[in-house]
Amino acid sequence: MEKMSNTVRSQSVKKWFKSSQALLSMLLVQIFATGLQLLSRVILVQGTYIFALTAYRHIVAAICVAPFAFYFERGLAKNFNWRVWLWLFCNGLVGMTMAIGLFYYGLRDTSATYSVNFLNLIPICTFLISIICRIENMKIRTWSGKTKCIGALMCLGGALATTLYTGKKFYIGHHHIHHSIEISVVAAHKTHMLRGTLCLVGSCCSFTAWFILQAKFMNLFPLRYWATMLSCIMAAVQSAVIGVCINSSKEVWRLEWNLQLITIIYSGALATAATFCLISWVITIKGPSYPAMFNPLALVFVAISETIILDEPLKVGTLVGMVLVIVGLYYFLLGKRNEIPRLLKSNVAAAALSTSMVDDPVVAQSTAIIVPSSSPDESVLVEIDKTDKK
């Protein structure tokens, strides 16, 4: 009887695990994102050269994505004409070198929680630019149009609250305890909120421009893994060239067995390649809106972790803005979800951390653009352009 009970319990656990694989995968993605934010914050405050960091992390990302490109897209026609190389260059420059570089500058000068708030605004910025450029219609009279507008306004209100209102500061757990050298450096680091905010706004705009370009680029070169790998290589070369022009000292480019090397490997292997695979798999079985619903969790994870681990204070203005951004993002995604008639297959392209997904172009053409909620390596559903079946 006891053996039968154990068998039933084991089967129920297996059944639960099988039915919850997508849920657990997305939680794992957000944990990867949280870890990347905290690691990046620490090494940037310690003085890591940002262009060296972006160059090395894109090299690791390209190496990690390469096996998928060579295996899953082997035998497919690859037309590398000058237009494709031009798009790859622009793809790496706008969406990786500029967007991630500016994000790192903003992360260094502000805080991880503050920076993540701006990443959650990328879907809204893309939506607004798409309307201004007449890529997408407002459809204000429809239910989905009203929901998207409410979500966009709430997100913008959250961004303003985070930026303009500080409020009281408080800590979670004990404060003024002994920390390691790394955490003490972070706690003592002086922030430059205005400069950091401008960099984060620039990063947000770069991601927005990149996502709008992605739809056309994926039509020209639909091989997602090859596009991701080559874009990472382009971004690594661009970051190296720009970085050497600014600072050619060997010291800033030298790699040692320290936290910087761990962060570089972590960002390429887990926050890019592993995240890439998990999101791709979940998208195929759950649709493009499903991963995006988990992205605000990374914001919560980062806010709590940064306060506990890095001894950074939580501000009332940040909490208010965080709640508005999360609720507004859910409203926006709910409106977007009702505009998608059906999902057949998705294409994901990741950068250090960013990802974009495209449906099967034979039946319908749909581009779901994903970007980090907690980092440029993570994922937030940004935009969906669809072409009706002809």
Image (cartoon, helix red, strand yellow):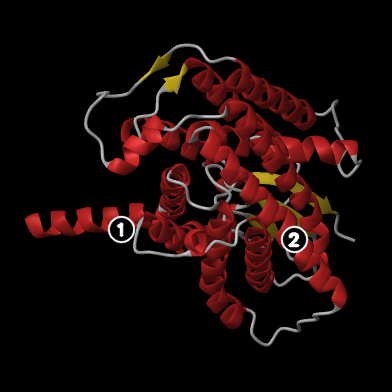
In this picture, is 214 found above or below 291?
below
For the point 80% across and 63% down, the residue is 217
Residue 91: assigned label:
2
The amino acid type found where label 2 is placed reads Asn
Q: Position of residue 152 (x, y in %)?
A: 72, 28
For the point 63% across and 32% down, the residue is 195
Whichever of callouts 2 and 1 sits on the residue coming sooner in the sequence is 1
Image quarter of the C terminus: bottom right
Secondary structure of the residue carrying numbered label 1: helix
User: How would you rate the neighbour count of disc 2 (Cα within 10 Å): few for under 14, some for 14-19, many for 20 or more?
Assistant: many
Q: Quadrant of residue 245?
A: bottom right
For the point 75% across and 52% down, the residue is 210
In this picture, is 187 found above or below 160?
below
Q: Quadrant of residue 354?
A: bottom right
Say if residue 63 shows up in the picture: yes
Say if residue 343 shows up in the picture: no
Q: Are marks 2 and 1 in contact (CB under 8 Å)?
A: no
Which residue bears the numbered disc 1? 14
Separation of marks 2 and 1 at Cα, in angstroms: 42 Å
Q: Position of residue 291 (x, y in %)?
A: 56, 48
